[in-house]
């Protein structure tokens, strides 16, 4: 076996070989980008597990041959942690048939309440890029209304966010997550509500912090009756923090009475940008694309769908001329 902490990549598999010695739990995970933090925490908490990951966020994730190969590799797993997916071989029903009580469905943590303008542009297989993969509905709104960069910057304010109903995203996001929670035995919403004002929980709408992952994993282990070591998460390199990180704007932090503040810079790996640089970058990117393609991705918010006169240009219902 390789040395402690060795990682072997065979996308979309990741095999983590840990501390040598007596065999520990063999754990399989089927997750998106949450896979990395999950494996990092369980490595520290359980000491010597063997963890194999199937990544739902990498090229080849929807290849049935890759899925079958992974399932063969983990046929003897003691525990399978899986997010829900509609892929036939990885669906909850298919996994239950393969693994029985060894399967535990886990939350796909997604919450944009404190970065409420965060969104994608385009669908998963054809997203519009810019200075970051994560766009801002505020910038999209300003660009499609023909506002200048200077006027767009003014919209990053309590009044600008209220106009786009962005302070309502908090409860909308928790309600959507609660609906997902109904399908899994260990809920994430109570954990978010407990720590929301004291600790940063998400870097983007779908990138949880190591702090949140650790609290959720501890809840899972308690649910399973698995004893674990105490873990100082400050000593774990947070892989998602090294990627893209959005600021929690100070006026948003004040609105929700957070007991902490974040940097106001945007991070794209090693590149740090202020708000003006981000707005200018997206304006330049949008100018090179068909105007009708610049819309907020995903299912439209009901408040936007209900008022196409004001918000239709954001969701493609009524593009502004």
Image (cartoon, rainbow, N blue to C red):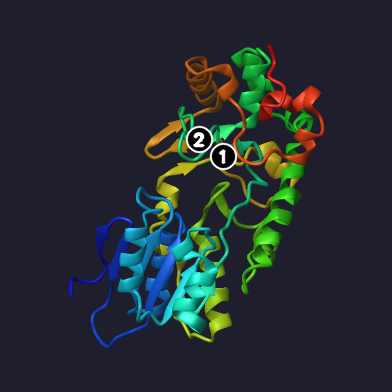
Vertical side of 259 occupied by 227: above or below: below
For mark 1, give the secondary structure.
loop
Q: Which residue is mark 1?
A: 247
Pick the front one: 191 or 104: 104
Give the quarter of the figure containing the N terminus.
bottom left
What residue is disc 2 on? 266
Instruction: Please state if 77 lies on the left or on the right of 249 as rendered.
Output: left
Please count the marks in the image.
2
- Residue 159 in the image: x percent, y percent? 77, 28
Labels 1 & 2 near each other (Cβ < 8 A)? yes
Q: Earlier in the sequence, mark 1 or mark 2?
A: 1
Is 292 left or right of 8, judged from the image as shown?
Answer: right
State the SS at label 2: strand
Image position of 183 (left or right of 309): left
Where on the picture, by quarter, is residue 80?
bottom left
Residue drawn where x is 37% and y is 79% of the image: 77
57, above or below 13, in the image:
above
**Quadrant in which residue 229 is drawn:** bottom left
Q: Position of residue 171 (x, y in %)?
A: 75, 51
Which residue is located at x 77 percent, y 43 percent?
Answer: 168
């Amino acid at each position: 076996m390789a040395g402690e902490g060795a990682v072997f990549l065979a996308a979309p598999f990741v095999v983590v070989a840990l501390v040598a010695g007596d065999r520990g739990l063999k754990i399989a995970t089927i997750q998106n980008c949450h896979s990395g933090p999950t494996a990092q925490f369980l490595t520290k908490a359980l000491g010597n597990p063997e963890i194999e990951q199937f990544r739902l966020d990498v090229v080849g994730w929807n290849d049935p041959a890759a899925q079958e190969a992974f399932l063969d590799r983990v046929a003897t797993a003691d525990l399978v942690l899986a997010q829900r997916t509609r892929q036939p071989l990885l669906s909850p029903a298919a996994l239950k048939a393969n693994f029985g009580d060894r399967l535990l469905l886990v939350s796909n943590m997604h919450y944009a309440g404190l970065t409420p303008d965060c969104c994608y542009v385009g669908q998963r297989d054809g997203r519009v890029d810019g200075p970051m993969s994560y766009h801002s509905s505020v910038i999209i709104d300003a660009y499609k209304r023909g506002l200048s960069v200077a006027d767009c910057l003014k919209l990053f304010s309590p009044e600008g966010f209220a106009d786009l109903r962005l302070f309502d995203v908090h409860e909308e996001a928790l309600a959507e997550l609660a609906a997902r929670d109904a399908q899994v035995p260990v809920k994430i919403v109570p954990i978010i509500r407990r720590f929301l004002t004291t600790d940063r929980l998400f870097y983007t709408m779908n990138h949880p912090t190591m702090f949140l992952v650790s609290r959720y994993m501890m809840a899972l282990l308690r649910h399973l009756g698995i004893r674990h070591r105490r873990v100082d998460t400050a000593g774990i390199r947070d892989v998602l923090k090294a990627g893209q990180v959005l600021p929690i704007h100070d006026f948003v932090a004040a609105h929700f009475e957070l007991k902490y503040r974040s940097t106001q810079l945007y991070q794209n790996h090693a590149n740090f940008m202020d708000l003006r640089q981000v707005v200018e970058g997206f304006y330049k990117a949008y100018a090179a694309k068909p105007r009708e393609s610049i819309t907020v991705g995903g299912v439209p918010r009901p408040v936007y769908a209900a008022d196409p006169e004001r918000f239709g240009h954001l969701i493609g219902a009524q593009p502004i001329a």
